[in-house]
């Protein structure tokens, strides 16, 4: 163990952080507080008039169920430009430092790798997540900061939106049921939400996303050291998944699977329990793009550089930070420049 980690452990022993049972009340998004005035909020929210959906109805649905679906809000052209960027990345993977996560047993020791170091057949296969490709791809940024998504998030946070990270999937993830907030932790942890953008029509058997309706309200799991998963947690992700499924079933929460069409978007709450169904037909892809977001208050430093002011890219009133480690690739996949 390094000297820094030893010092950190000693410090934590002397001054243990308070063990949280829930998100702290201060800074909780207005919509997560008791009896939010949704009608009053929408009257004061100018963007509500220009949205392709009824914001009041969506906010009520979000409060109750922990997610919303926005149908047919993203153009095929923009999605196709992004998919062409992904194809180019795969084709020329030996040229790029972009990272992927590989959840296959043979990569257990080093699940996060540079695409240049991974054989093409692995990159194109199951159990792969391309990480933060939006940094390199203009189309990826346009999808991530799409007006329909950003306007809804701006409403739930009542703050400027800041995108944090993205994951691109060619196949269903087959991930255990989980909530995002123990793993994706902005500087204000309750200021977190995610979007799931269908890059193709989802077919049954392709490892659909599943989610438990209303599960954002269940009591939070205790990892042995509070509500976040980190080096001091005594419970593991499998314990977490078991807790969530058992608790959702005990409470009679409906489990749904997501069969979106290309261009539809699911937005989910930081605490909505969700995961990936097993893939029943190995020939079926399930191309999708997942982005995590916070607010200007909740995320003001890039997670790879907590010291310096980030370089910001702004679209539709929302920011995403340039990757401080990969500056040479930023926006180098330009297909999306003239597509909306
Ligand atoms: O799309 C999926 O199958 C799972 C995605 C997910 O759970 C996540 O990114 O948090």
Image (cartoon, rainbow, N blue to C red):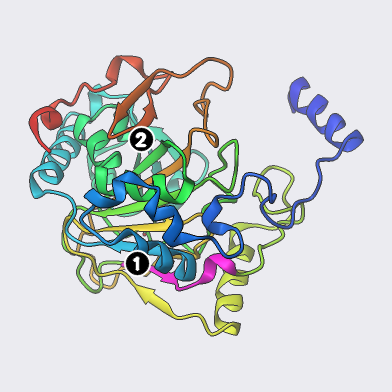
Q: Which residue is mark 2?
A: 132
Look at the image and tell me in which quarter the N terminus lies: top right
Mark 1 or 2, closer to the camera: 1
User: Residue 285's image quarter?
Assistant: bottom left
Separation of disc 1 and disc 2 at Cα?
32 Å
Q: Quadrant of ligand 1?
A: bottom left
Q: Which residues are magenta?
A: 208-217
User: Can residue 168 be seen by looking at this rendering?
Assistant: no
Q: Where residue 183 sits: x, y (%)?
A: 56, 47
User: Which residue does the image show at 58% across and 17% down from the upper left?
Assistant: 307
For the view shown, which residue lies furthest in the right direction?
A: 14
- Compared to residue 228, the image places residue 95 above or below, namely above
Would residue 215 be counted in the magenta stretch?
Answer: yes
Q: Residues within 10 Å of mark 2 (few under 14, many from 20)?
A: many
Q: Where residue 280 sits: x, y (%)?
A: 28, 73
User: Which residue does the image show at 47% across and 44% down from the upper left?
Assistant: 158
User: Which residue does the image show at 85% across and 30% down from the upper left?
Assistant: 11
Would residue 278 be counted in the magenta stretch?
Answer: no
User: Residue 72's image quarter?
Assistant: bottom left
Q: Which residue is mark 1?
A: 57
Nearest the viewer among 80 and 52 is 52
Q: Where residue 199 sits: x, y (%)?
A: 19, 53
Nearest the viewer among 54 and 97 is 54
Q: Where residue 37 sits: x, y (%)?
A: 50, 60
Q: Residues within 10 Å of mark 1 (few under 14, many from 20)?
A: few
């Amino acid at each position: 163990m390094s000297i820094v980690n030893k010092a950190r452990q000693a410090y934590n022993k002397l001054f243990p952080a308070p063990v949280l049972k829930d998100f702290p009340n201060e800074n909780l998004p207005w919509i997560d507080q008791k009896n939010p005035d949704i009608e009053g909020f929408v009257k004061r929210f100018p963007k509500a008039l220009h949205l392709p959906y009824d914001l009041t109805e969506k906010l009520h649905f979000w409060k109750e169920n922990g997610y919303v679906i926005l149908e047919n809000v993203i153009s095929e052209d923009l999605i196709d430009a992004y998919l062409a960027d992904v194809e180019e990345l795969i084709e020329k993977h030996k040229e790029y430092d972009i990272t992927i996560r590989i959840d296959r047993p043979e990569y257990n020791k080093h699940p996060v790798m540079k695409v240049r170091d991974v054989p093409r057949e692995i990159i194109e296969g199951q159990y792969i997540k391309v990480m933060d490709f939006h940094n390199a791809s203009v189309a990826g940024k346009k999808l991530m900061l799409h007006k329909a998504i950003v306007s809804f998030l701006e409403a739930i946070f009542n703050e400027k939106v800041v995108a944090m990270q993205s994951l691109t999937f060619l196949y269903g993830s087959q991930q255990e049921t989980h909530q995002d907030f123990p793993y994706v932790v902005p500087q204000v942890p309750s200021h977190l939400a995610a979007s799931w953008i269908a890059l193709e029509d989802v077919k049954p058997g392709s490892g659909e996303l599943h989610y438990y309706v209303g599960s954002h309200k269940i009591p939070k799991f205790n990892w042995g050291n509070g509500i976040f998963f980190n080096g001091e947690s005594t419970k593991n992700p499998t314990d977490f998944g078991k807790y969530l499924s058992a608790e959702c079933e005990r409470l009679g929460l409906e489990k749904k699977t997501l069969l979106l069409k290309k261009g539809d978007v699911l937005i989910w709450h930081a605490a909505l329990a969700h995961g990936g169904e097993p893939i029943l037909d190995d020939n079926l892809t399930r191309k999708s793009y997942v982005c995590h977001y916070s607010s200007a208050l909740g995320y003001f430093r890039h997670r790879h550089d907590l010291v310096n002011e980030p370089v910001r890219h702004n679209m539709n009133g929302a920011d995403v930070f340039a990757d401080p480690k990969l500056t040479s690739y930023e926006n180098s996949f330009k297909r999306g420049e003239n597509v909306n």
